[in-house]
Structure formats: structure tokens, C-alpha cells
Amino acid sequence: MGVKQPLQPSKFRDWQGPSVEVQPRRGSWRTFLQVLGPAYLVAIGYMDPGNWATDLAAGSTLGYRLLWVVALSSLMATLLQSLCCRLGIATGMDLAQASARLLPGRWRLPLWLMAELAIIACDLAELVGSAIALQLLFGLPLAWGVALTVADTLLLLLLQQWGVRGLELVAISLIALVGACFALELLLLKPDWGEVIQGFWPRSINPRQGNELFLAAGILGATVMPHNLYLHSSLVQSRRWPIDPMARHWALRYSTWDAVLALSLAFLINCSILILAAGSFHGQQLQPVADLHEAYRLLTPTLGTALASTLFAVALLAAGQSSSLTATLAGQIVMDGFLQIRLPDWQRRLLTRCLALVPALGTVLLLGESAINQLLILSQVVLSLQLPFAVIPLILFCSRPGLMGNLLAPPWLVILSWGCAALIVAINTSLLLSLVF
């Protein structure tokens, strides 16, 4: 049996802050500015330190060869995030709530555990990236930096007092800071734009080339993040629209444009990281530069100014701290949606951060700082492996007429979405087979 459409606009959860009332006018910039924001909280998760590690490794190892994977992953992310907007606006449920209510009961606990694993993997990348940035900027030992990141819980609690609009403003500001840093980096680098354009041309990936396949899967996991699907389907409900069938279409249209704009900025930043690595390190060093510390050290002599290294570290710190916002919000949404458990913000933040702290500190203390970059890339591969368990239910829900009503996904969108899901499963299967054999 399908679920009836809600007759009233969905109420944004009280612990996420008050909703934002929207006065819709077709083609109105004022309306768009009222809607603008949720996708930027999602976009900062698409440029977290895990992306840095995979893009840096891909650029320094293979040059511009995998730029097309970044582009394809970004297109897939935009398409899937648009489905999240559609689900949230049409049903008043986020992906976690819909999965708990509409899928067989035996799937609820496994899907929750997989979603939590993805959030921990994401938080691990943010934790490690912030600790590395603190070490690069202030010389703080890496183990101390890892431990110190627990304190950013206080920062998050402070920011949440501003409500969802305040968090969105912080997200937009941090994205602008990271983008400005990399724009200056590319001005200093002056890459060969002809070779850059060629990197966007799709080419086959040989499954026997384990390193290339591993990096491609890492880029996919770093770009299309499972926890962002849960997050966006909830945040899109922070806008309160009039009770009007036409207003629902306006809500979907404006929210989709919000996602396209925000994820386009994240795409440009991810491309900039890979281009910087390829232009600075590929073929210039005896060994590929796949370590954030080494990249920071080599940027100064390579580009001829210490400003290049400083910009790199500042952007890394901003990316790590901004991405912490999304991990905590997504964790609360997932726990509430699947289990109907609402922890205080500080408890949820500490839970996620402490679970990520164990592998990070263990790696530093037992294997040394040199192993931390591999841990970053591995976290992104874990995200890639978890992705189908969020994507497939999302597509199923958006293609159900009784659930979606007049916001049912059109056939072309459903076909493209299943194509994305099939590609994700194929890459993950090839990766697992290459690791086993």
C-alpha cells in the first residue's frame, strides 16, 4: 500500500531549529535566496579532507587522467541529491525515516549500522584532516591534534544556537574561503589548460590496474557520500511552503537549483585539488606525492612561494572543520529516523567523534604518521562501499506513485538514477574482487 501524501507542510524537527517561511513567486530572486542554503551544508561534505587525499593521490600518480571520474561523480551526486529534495518535499520524510517505515522491518537495523559506519568514516577523514592542518600551521604533534579535535564539539554547539540559517551562512563562508585559496593556488601554478581539458575525456579503467581502480573508487566514495543523502532529504524540509500543489513544484525546482549551484562549487574545488597535484607533482618527483604533509612541503619550492603552502594548509583546516557540521547533523538525522532516538547534540557529537578517534589515534601511535594518508583514502573507499545501501532505497521511494504523488520522478530520471546505482555497484564489485584476488 502506498503512503498518502501529507496534507500539511512537513514540520522541521525541533532540535534542528525553526523552519524558514518561503513566499513563492515564480522566477523571483527573493524566493531563491530564501530557499538557498541547505545544499551548501551538503556541499561542504563533498570537499572534506578525504577528497583531498584521494584527489592528491590521483593527480600526483596519474596526472589529469581521472578528472573525468571527478566530473562523472559530481554529476551523479547532483542527480542523487535532487532525488533527496524530491523525497523530502513530496513525503515530509527524510531518507532514514522512509527506510524505517517503508522497507521490511528486518532491514532497519542493518541499514542504520551501515549509515553510522559511513558517518564514522566521514568523521574520521575530517578529524585526520584537521589534525594535519594544525600540525602544518602550528607544528602541533599529530597525536595531539587528533585528540584536540574533540574540542570542536563546543564550536558546533555554539554554531547551532544560530539555527539552520546561521549554519548555512557558515557553510557558504567556508566554501568561499576554500575556493579562494585554490583559485590563488591555480594562479600560481598556471597549469596547461589543454591537458586539463583532455583529462575530462572519459577513458576505460583497467580492473587489473589496482591502484587506478582503488583511486577511482576513492574519488567516487569521496564525492557521492551516503550520509549526505540522509542529510539533504531532511534539510530541504527546513523551508515552509504554502499548502498548495503548485508550491510543491516550486519548492522542488528552487531546491534543485540550490543543489546544482552548491555542488558545482564543490566540483570546481575538487578539480582544483587534482589539477594542483597533477601540475605540481606528476612527473616532477621520483615518487608520486600522495601525502598531505609532503604536498605542503613541496608546494613552496615547486610554485616558488611560501604562500602556496600556507594557502594549502588554511584551506585544509577550513574544509575539515566545515565538514564536521555535516557529520553531526547527519548522525542525528540517521539515529532519529531509523531508531527514533534523539541524543543531545553534544552527546551525539562526542559519540561520532570518539568512534572515529580510536582508529585515527591507533594508526598514529602504532603505525606512525606515514600511515595516516592511507587511512584517509581507505575511509573514502569505505564510503563508496556503503553508498548502494542508501542510493537503492532512495531510487525505489522516488519511483513509487502512491508515495510521491505529483512529484513522482519521471521515467528518464529513474533510468539515469538506476544507471548511477549500477555503476556504483560495478565499481565496488570490481574493487572488492581486485582486493581479494
Image (spheres, rainbow, N blue to C red):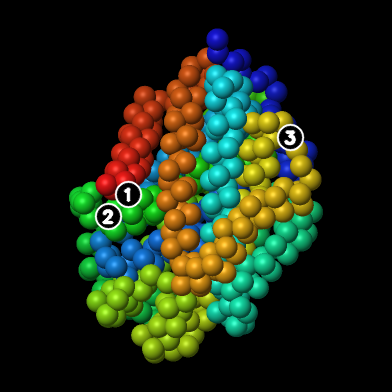
Q: Is residue 208 visible?
A: yes
Q: Mark 2 falls on what kind of element?
A: helix
Which of the two residues, 64 or 245, is positioned nearer the viewer here?
64
- Find residue 252 and report its horizontal and vertical position in percent: 54, 34
The answer to which of marks 2 and 1 sits earlier in the sequence is 2
Report which quarter residue 423 is drawn in. top left
Nearer the observer, 252 or 125: 125
Specify the label residue 341 is tagged with: 3
Could you tell me which residue is drawn at 27 percent across and 47 percent down?
437
**Mark number, residue 435:** 1
Q: Which residue is mark 2?
A: 210
User: Label 1 is placed on what type of residue?
Assistant: Leu
Image height of 379 relative to 183, above or below: above
Q: What residue is drawn where x is 35% and y is 37%? A: 425
- The image position of residue 65, as x and y in percent, is 25, 61
Seen from this angle, which residue lies furthest top? 1
